[in-house]
Image: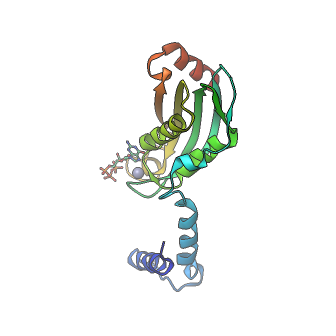
């Protein structure tokens, strides 16, 4: 990320929306936006699987769920936030993972320009490839600011997306168990 190019671009936007980029409150804004972009887009170019370290061999036969993982991402159509909760479940097959790594996975896939559907699938695929579990299920619930503060203007509407792999593709009872446990 080129610092000067970002700052210049933000300055141009400020001018074009009718602002004075040199007034006191805006003088440091291009620099603030640059630093914010470095933070909120820090996942771009990184492989989600890289955060899935701390894999342990363990015979655990039951479903493992980490729910209510808060996330903030940025919609690729409007570059405004969408945010909500992720729920990630998997049925292990001899390998389990450090729980914090699941939250790290949600974090790394959210810190880039996203679509909620793609983000959901990226989480499922990374878990599936790294742990080779019997199955993975991911559910995201989010509010999109591009739908609430602009456009159709429907604050409070929530978009729910699901991705399943392995046993959760076919086993309705397993899916039901997951939905009951995340309630
Ligand atoms: N499927 C999906 N759509 C999204 C997501 N984030 C934003 N969108 C939608 O992307 C669409 C882009 O539509 P366009 O018609 O190209 O853009 P627009 O003219 O700004 O559309 P409006 O939002 O309807 O005003 C909109 O319907 C958004 O609601 C997402 O994560 N997944
Ligand atoms: Zn959008």
Residue 147 in percent (x, y) is at 43, 47
Residue at 60% of width from left, 48% of height from top?
51
Q: Extreme top residue here?
A: 173
Residue at 40% of width from left, 56% of height from top?
78
Vertical arrangement, residue 27 with respect to residue 124, above or below: below
Residue 171 in percent (x, y) is at 48, 15
Residue at 54% of width from left, 37% of height from top?
127
Of 122 and 158, nearer the camera is 122
Of 89 and 142, nearer the camera is 89
Report the quarter where the C terminus lies. top right
Vertical arrangement, residue 41 with respect to residue 34, above or below: above
Of 180 and 149, nearer the camera is 180
The chosen color scheme is rainbow
Of 83 and 24, nearer the camera is 83
Q: From this viewpoint, is residue 39 visible?
A: yes
**Direction from residue 81 to residue 181 in the image, left or right:** right
Residue at 64% of width from left, 33% of height from top?
67
């Amino acid at each position: 990320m080129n610092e000067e190019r970002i700052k210049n671009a933000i300055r141009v936007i400020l001018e074009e929306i009718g602002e004075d980029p040199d007034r006191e409150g805006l003088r440091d804004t291009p620099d603030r936006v640059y630093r914010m972009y470095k933070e909120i887009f820090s996942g771009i170019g990184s492989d989600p699987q890289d955060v899935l370290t701390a894999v342990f061999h363990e015979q655990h036969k039951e479903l493992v769920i980490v729910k209510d993982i808060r996330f903030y991402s940025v919609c690729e159509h409007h570059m405004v936030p969408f945010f909500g909760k992720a729920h990630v479940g998997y049925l292990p097959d001899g390998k389990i993972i450090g729980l914090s790594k699941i939250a790290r996975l949600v974090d790394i896939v959210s810190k880039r320009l996203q679509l909620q559907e793609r983000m959901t699938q990226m989480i499922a695929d990374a878990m599936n490839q790294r742990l080779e579990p019997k199955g993975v299920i991911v559910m995201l619930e989010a509010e999109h600011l591009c739908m609430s503060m602009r456009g159709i203007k429907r604050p409070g509407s929530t978009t729910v997306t699901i991705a399943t792999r392995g046993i959760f593709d076919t086993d309705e009872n397993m899916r039901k168990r997951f939905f009951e446990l995340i309630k």
